[in-house]
Amino acid sequence: MGGAAEMMSTAISEQMAQLVGRIGAGDSRAEAELVERFTRGLYAYLRRLGCPPEQVEDLHQETFRVVIERLRGDGIAEPEALAGFLRGTARHLHLGARRQAARRRTEADEQAVADAEDPRSGQLHQVLDAEAADLVRNLLAELEPPRDRQILYRFYIAEDRKEAICRDLGLSSLHFNRVLFRARRRFKSLFESFEKQQRLSRAS
């Protein structure tokens, strides 16, 4: 029984090695055979990975595209492990798609926050309205990184136009909003720390 299973495994490995060799030699029928042989299993594997239904088809096609290009070019170290190489490629593409989706959600969230606020309102502008410009300048001098100091000073104190700041700092409009949002958040933390120290000084 064990010998039969071993012989079958050896035969399959030889078939995979031959299939890889034919694709490497430019045999388009071998490419079609690859897709036909593994397409059902690849669909099932992508679903087991938790791939969203709307992405399964795209990742299925992309996996075969990447694998076929690899086999046409450098090939793979273990041709008999073709099935494992397909699954590994699919998993890598799936994880990459998840990271991209997470990045897009983070950028969208930050942009929504920036768009929801009047960029010249909020705590920093309230401080300026309270005629505490000297305090703001002192706090800005402590703010890191230097780009935060520059963008806050130019936008709120010097009241430079957004377009001019973007041009000088090499920022797109969207990137400017994100940088400004983060700089305001850091300034707010710095200002709250200053206020806390002032309260403690008055209480002592």
Image (tube, grey):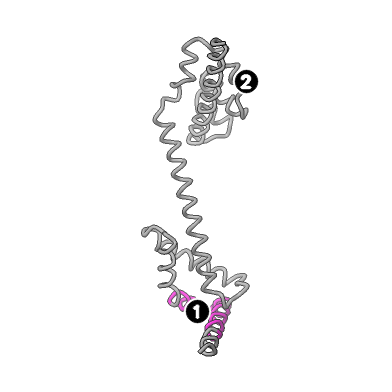
- Residue under the point 40% across and 63% down: 47
Q: Is residue 173 above or below residue 151?
A: below
Quadrant in the picture for residue 133 = top right
Image position of 42 (left or right of 2): left
Q: Residues within 10 Å of mark 1 (few under 14, many from 20)?
A: some
Please name the amino acid that badge 2 sits on.
Ala
What secondary structure do most residues of the magenta stretch adopt? Answer: helix
Q: Is residue 52 above or below residue 45?
A: above
Q: Secondary structure at mark 1?
A: helix
Query: Which percent across, then down, holds residue 118?
Result: 41, 25
Residue extending furthest toward the left: 53
> Residue 20 colored magenta?
yes
Q: Residues within 10 Å of mark 2 (few under 14, many from 20)?
A: few
Per the image, the residue denoted by label 2 is: 141
- Residue under the point 52% across and 79% down: 27
Where does the magenta region start and end? Answer: 10-36
Residue 151's disc is none
Query: Which percent across, then down, holds residue 162?
Result: 50, 27
Q: Secondary structure at mark 2?
A: helix
Q: Earlier in the sequence, mark 2 or mark 1?
A: 1
Please name the amino acid that badge 1 sits on.
Ala
Seen from the viewer's position, the closer of residues 34 and 126 is 126
Per the image, the residue denoted by label 1 is: 30
> Residue 61 colored magenta?
no
**CB under 8 Å between discs 2 and 1:** no
